[in-house]
Image (cartoon, rainbow, N blue to C red):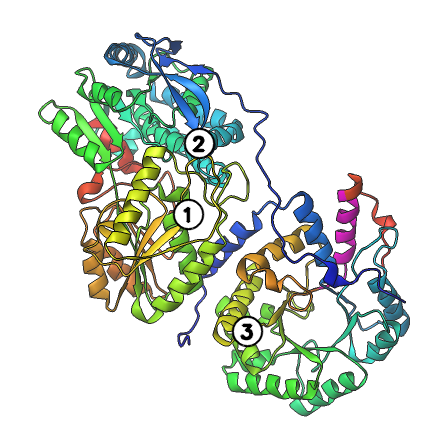
Amino acid sequence: METFLHRIDEVGAQERVARLFSRSIKKESKINALRTILSMIDLTTLEGKDSPGKVKQLCYKAAHLHDQFPHLPTVAAICVYPTMVSAAKTALEGTGIKVASVATAFPSGMTSLEFKLEEVRMVVDAGADEVDMVISRGKFLRGEYQYVSDEIARVKEACGKSHLKVILETGELVTLDNVRFASEIAMEAGADFIKTSTGKVTPAATPPVVLVMLEAIRDYYKQTGKKIGMKPAGGISKAKLAVQYLVMVRETLGQDWLTADLFRFGASSLANDVLMQIVKQSTGVYQSANYFSID
Amino acid sequence: METTTNKSDLKTDWIYSPAPESTDHIRINQRYDLFINGEFLLPEKEKYFETINPANEKKLADVAEADQADVNTAVTAARKAYENVWSKMDPAERGKYIYRIARLIQERAREFAVIETMDGGKPIRESRDIDIPLVSAHFFYYAGWADKLEYAFPGKQARSIGVAGQIIPWNFPLLMAAWKLAPALATGNTVVLKPAETTPLTAMKLAEIIQEADLPPGVVNIINGDGKTGRALVEHPGIDKIAFTGSTEVGKLIMKTVAGTGKRYTLELGGKAANIIFEDAAIDQAVEGIIDGIFFNQGHVCCAGSRLFVQESVAETVISKLKNRMETLIVGDPLDKNTDIGAINSKMQLDKIKMYVDIGLNEGGTVYQSSCKLPEKGYWHAPTLFTDVSQSHRIVQEEIFGPVLAVQTFRTVDEVITKANNTPYGLSGGVWTDKGAKIFKVSKAIRAGVLWANTFNKFDPSSPFGGYKESGMGREGGLEGLQPYVNLV
């Protein structure tokens, strides 16, 4: 059992990222990667102006990414606000696509634990398969790690059978040392997934942050045998970057994690760029963005 | 609504497709002659030797072998160029030529990288991202000094020495040529350069660039051959200075040979560097540093971190992470952009590495090798580490010059400093800790030319490089790298 504190050297982490990202993914390995990426997407809409109608359209898109191109996978899940859960649940019935809901006063988490738990119970009752909670960054930065841990444990309890993704909001934790420590706290407290960001704070998922979280998952697995999932979210809109993240996962955690059960991309516009690349791989030319639906 | 495909159909054994660097644009002549006096000349005895690609054992070219008479011709040409042209040239003009060489190398960087990889076996990632960029950086750096020597040595006049005989190794062929040529030319000396016999090609390509740059004939002469040619060069009375990079054994021979002749010399020899991981280090980044320290260029690096010291409390974790990381190293076709570890430079070197692995096993060391599949043709060695070894083991004492790491643990700072210094070598070292004070304490106490803190294998033309003890004498790079090529009056 490791008893020492994990320190992260930022320069070293960046160098490792650069090395991983210089892998050259071509031909068949690229096509496999692109298809895998599609299957790992949590297609997301998290806006104040979201409507049941928009969610319904998104759900159709989730199951029919590009019907002109046969045998494509569906995305892994739809990620919405609590009030949109039931609309999504209805629209996705029979597709096998999961419904994920943000909760716990997303994105800031600035409310009492009682309200957060109530919100979690509400989305679970409405049918959310997955709950994306946010940690109390203020408490973490103040050093109240026990509070952060207890809160995650209580939320996990409230989730029942639904899967819990714990958003660290790494953009507010600032240092990689904090990212590593928060990852450890979240995993110990019961997270099924750890997730970088809400998408509402800049920077969102950065490559060094994702690397450090993957390394934390790897070390936790080595110690406990438990496989925790990872979800980078925010700012991943290009297929190339997504492929680079797959390389990072493969070489940090191994093949086992290259599945939607253990790795997700939280993204709204990534799917179309991946589709465009997939079509390009087969036709040799890029099609206009107008050929890909924007739902 | 129904799903089009079940996602469980997706392949999870995701392997990288081959991504070879193209060789279409590469031109390698069938035969390379001697580059003397600005021209390619036939060798006196018309003897040639083959240079092969160590990754597939295929012949790349025939290369002229220089004998005593050819060495004479080259030294005479260099002398003439020194007396008549180069030493008298306005320093700013000299600088222009060196800048031109730097630019031409930059322009043809991809070609140089591919040939370096084909002739030497190193991964294209390294020749493309490290070797060749550093080559042009060295020429750029020393080009800048050419007309500023009075600022390098305030209050003194820096006078050139004469004809330099330069003998370079096979591990960084073009980079070592650059390290030696650039300061010699900037200070007004002329050169006879002898590349290593297994890796002559990029130097011959450099000869083409030197022609293209219109460098006055005889300023740089490049001759090939093995140790005999090197010896003829060292013993030649027309040589004023010897610059050698290679084994400590040959370095000692050179010292004996030039003793009493008045020839100046610099030697950059072997190493057995300590790479020290303290318990308060950033462990994952330290593991990367260990990997880079020993497996960079298949371990054919004189400053390789070949002796690893890990503090006891983190040893188990570090070694376990290290083994995992070794599994992800891709060993294979050096031209593939995803290759981490390429081919061993020669059969001779491979035999030597294997011999040391056997010695380590016979001495009771515990070996671990990554499970990578090695290609059948060519010279290959899996990344290897030994535990259960001590300072008394030969694989801890002697330079293996291959991808073989010897791991020891330690408890206290003083213990590790003592052990780190317990070697006849002193070229480099690494210290990994989050504590600044510890970095200063340890790096001051270790007798080695370069100490890296929380990183490894960082090179820059402005930073001097060279050894203590049997790792050599003199420095290359930086302002200090000018000194071996000037007389200060």
Q: Chain of mark 3?
A: A
| Residue that label 2 marks | B136
CA separation in Å, label 2 and label 3: 43 Å
Q: Which residue shows up at 57% across the image and 80% down it? A: A138
Which numbered disc, 1 or 2, marks the residue that appears first in the sequence? Answer: 2
Taking the image as shown, residue B293 lies to the left or right of residue A176, namely left
| Residue that label 3 marks | A183
Q: Which residue shows up at 68% across the image and 69% down it? A: A261
Marks 1 & 3 on one chain? no
For the C terminus of chain B, give its image quadrant: top left
Mark 2 residue crowding within 10 angstroms, few (<14) / some (14–19) / many (20+): many
Q: Chain of mark 2?
A: B
CA separation in Å, label 1 and label 3: 35 Å
Q: Indicate whether A163 appears above or below A29.
A: below
Q: Main secondary structure of the magenta part?
A: helix
Q: Do we see residue A69 in this rendering?
A: yes
Residue type at mark 1?
Ala
Q: Position of residue B122 (x, y in %)?
A: 44, 37
For the N terminus of chain B, give its image quadrant: bottom right
| Residue that label 1 marks | B382
Q: Secondary structure at mark 2?
A: helix
